[in-house]
Image (spheres, coloured by chain):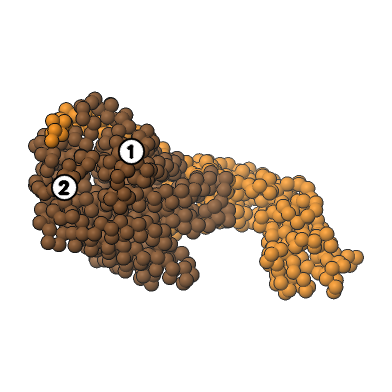
Chain colours: A orange, B brown
Amino acid sequence: MTENEHVILTSPARTGKMMIIMLGICIVGGAIFFGMWDYWISQPPPVVAMMSGADDHGGAPAVATGKTITQDLKFVQTPDGFTDLAFNALTGEPGHNPTINAAVGDKIIFNVSNQDGGFHAFGVTADAEGFSGIVPGSEVASATAPLQKGESETSEFVPAEEGTYYYICTVPGHRELGMVGEIIVGPSEGPAEAAAPTGVSHDFTLNFVESEDGFSDLAFNALTGEEGHNPDLVVNSGDEVTITAANAGKGFHAFGVVAAPDDFNNALWGSEIASSSAPLKAGESGTTTFTAGAPGTYYYICTVPGHASLGMQGSFIVE
Amino acid sequence: MVLELQKPRPVWQIMFSTHHTDVGLLYLISSIAFLFMGGALALLIRAELFLPEAQLIADAMTFNRIFTVHGTTLIFLFLLPSASAVGNYFVPIMVRYKDMAYPKLNAIAFWMIPPGAALIWLGFADFTWYATPPYSIISAPGPAADMWIFGLKILGISSVLGAINFVVTILKCKHPDMSIGQVPLLAWAFLSSSLIVLVAIPTFAAALLMLLTDRLGVTGFFNPAMGGDPIAYAHLFWFTFHPEVYVLVIPAIGMMYEIIPRFSRKPIFSKSSGIFAFVLLSIVSFSSWAHHMYATGMSFTEKTVFMLGTLAAVPASGMHVFNFVATMWNGRIKFLTPMMWAIGGIALFFSAGAGGVANAAMPLDFTTHDTYWVVGHFHLFVMGTIAFGTIGFIYYMFPYVTGRMYNETMGKVHFILSFVGTVLVFFTQHVLGLYGMPRRIFDYPAIPEWIAMNQIATVGAMIIGVSMVIFLINLIHSSAKGKPADIHDPFGLGGKYYYPFESKNPHH
């Protein structure tokens, strides 16, 4: 056999070259790696910005005015089930398909009930005909899983733009038979009944704090059970409020005063600091100054989706 | 080098060569490098868990990043490339062809690994190797998470290209005189595992794209807020990655099929049962993916089907073990390092398999799900079986690759320490799981039993760490200064066997 003559032994020089190449890659890579360690985890996924922004149906999110309109709606129909369908009362009777007047940002709550023998479903649309374009959140049941007789449900709708919307029965054909009413949306009235500027100013400092693991408890200033946990902020309507919020945790946070804790898209009065898509990173802080609007109980929250429900919310009381 | 073009060449020529042994060498060196990098992360994880509360690692997110990259590295950058290394060296020789079927494709498949690895290592994502949605969609910070997704995408394409190459080389380029039944078991292992790759990987490739578009907010496949279903991701992921377990283990078993007959100085007991078991394994590998998901609220019928599908892998695995034992029976076994690793690997394969059978029983799974039992179980497979087979085979290839012998004593010490360490870490973790310790946690309550078992596991891991340092020294020192090997019989086995560097058996 002659293969032995062809055997090439690995030489120390060659092993050395391999080691130099490998170590070189490790050193260069390691420098980039440790130098940019925090950069690589500095941006939230783009979908978060979209989820916290508007949906495609309603245009830009409305600034909540804090005003709530409650409307009871009842599906009614003639005994034969097809000659006339309507809400609340048949054609010609008082209370037939009531028209709702609202302003941009008002919250309209529908208590929908099915009292007749047919199947019905409910939704709000901007389309002048047909049963599509239902604004998410405004629907009750659906054409394939409709409300049965005697059932009732609640939904809500916050108009984002001026104009005319229609509340309809979303079962195909029912709208054309008369189950349709108008919602006329006027310009935003802004925070209702806000007092004139009082000239009084308040300064508050809030810290975003997190439990050790970063998710089991989130709060302002102190964790649940500790002193100073989510303090109540009390101001008078028309006062000038300055809030400084600092991120003392490790996650991303943003600040805003809202009408309801789960309404993290709609900060009131320009009270937001950063946003869920461009949040405060660990160690950063921000300041906002705004004028407190109409009296009522509001909430200051972390506007990053989900954080308020994990505990980052406190009462903001306007007297 | 021996398994090489018969002429010394400058390093850059080897790096940019398309010859199968050169590509094999690149695969081998990079996979060994990633073995040490991923292993170092494992030691960090174990050191952190030595005591409750945070010591070494600053916070939970850093811990998550470390174990995500630990898992991703060892699976995709050590186990898969090391199998490709062996395949590249041996498959063309075993089917008596001059090279792989598509040499350039082969080199491309390797050169996709460095960019993939760079994306994974630089980003250091934090959403586990499973990329758990919806966390990975709505919370995992970028660009690390996006880099991980692209890195895996690149590595997935690399695996598919490699698999195509192996299948074509074995089926279409084998010597015309050679029937498919005469193809050695190691090459059969690559044929079966490559076929699994071709069927399994596209699903995950699709899931990765869906994950990415979900992150971008374009789609909502796995995003519950947009009507998506994270469980769908679990199905897509495990449809790829349960078979992937077999993609990893089948080449390791093939390597044992090369080592065990040679060091037992007996022909393999039953080659046809080995082939049959490989084919059977690659089919039943697709019948068990949802056993990872018993706890997701599947119906009783589904759970029963997947339980039986999982148990269907037992006969095939048992055939391999019996084949090994029957081959060693009455053989004149020479206990050199590769043989010790192979036997250790079989013993741990059997233990891991026994744990797997217990775990496949769905009622028990509800107790063990997401506990350290699972960690112990799959690590016993990937470390105890697959890495043992692979490391044994690295020792076995060493004289053929470098022309020099490794240091036998260091090799044996490496094996003994690794074996003891592996048993300490992963057997203990099974028990720890039964005591209720959840996996993927960074801090744990100071329950005395948990502390004790975590400390045993950490000591075991450190023992493995020491053994791996010995391995590294052995590799570097012996490749430079080891004593030249007698290339016709480096292990002094005698007998009439053909040797891997020869394209055909000289005794025929």
Q: Name the residue rendered at 47%, 71% in the picture.
A: B301
Q: Amino acid at mark 1?
A: Met
Query: Measured from the top left, where is residue B484 in percent x and y?
Result: 10, 36
Which residue lies most toward the top here?
A: B10
Q: Is residue B367 above or below residue A28?
A: below
Taking depth in this image into account, of B47 and A1 the one nearest to the observer is: A1
Mark 1, Cα crowd under 10 Å, few <14 / some 14-19 / many 20+, is many
Q: Amino acid at mark 2?
A: Tyr
Query: Measured from the top left, where is residue A211 in percent x and y?
Result: 40, 55
Q: Name the residue rendered at 74%, 69% in the picture.
A: A119
Taking depth in this image into account, of B417 and B43 the one nearest to the observer is: B417
Can you see residue B247?
Answer: yes
Q: Mark 1 highlights which residue?
A: B100
Structural distance between the alpha carbons of marks 1 and 2:
24 Å
Nearest to N terminus: mark 1 or mark 2: 1
Mark 2, Cα crowd under 10 Å, few <14 / some 14-19 / many 20+, is some
Q: Quadrant of residue B482?
A: top left
Taking depth in this image into account, of A141 and B313 the one nearest to the observer is: B313
Q: Mark 2 highlights which residue?
A: B497
Q: Quadrant of residue B385?
A: bottom left
Q: Quadrant of residue A242?
A: top right
Q: Name the residue rendered at 43%, 70% in the picture.
A: B304
Q: Nearer the viewer, mark 1 or mark 2?
A: 2
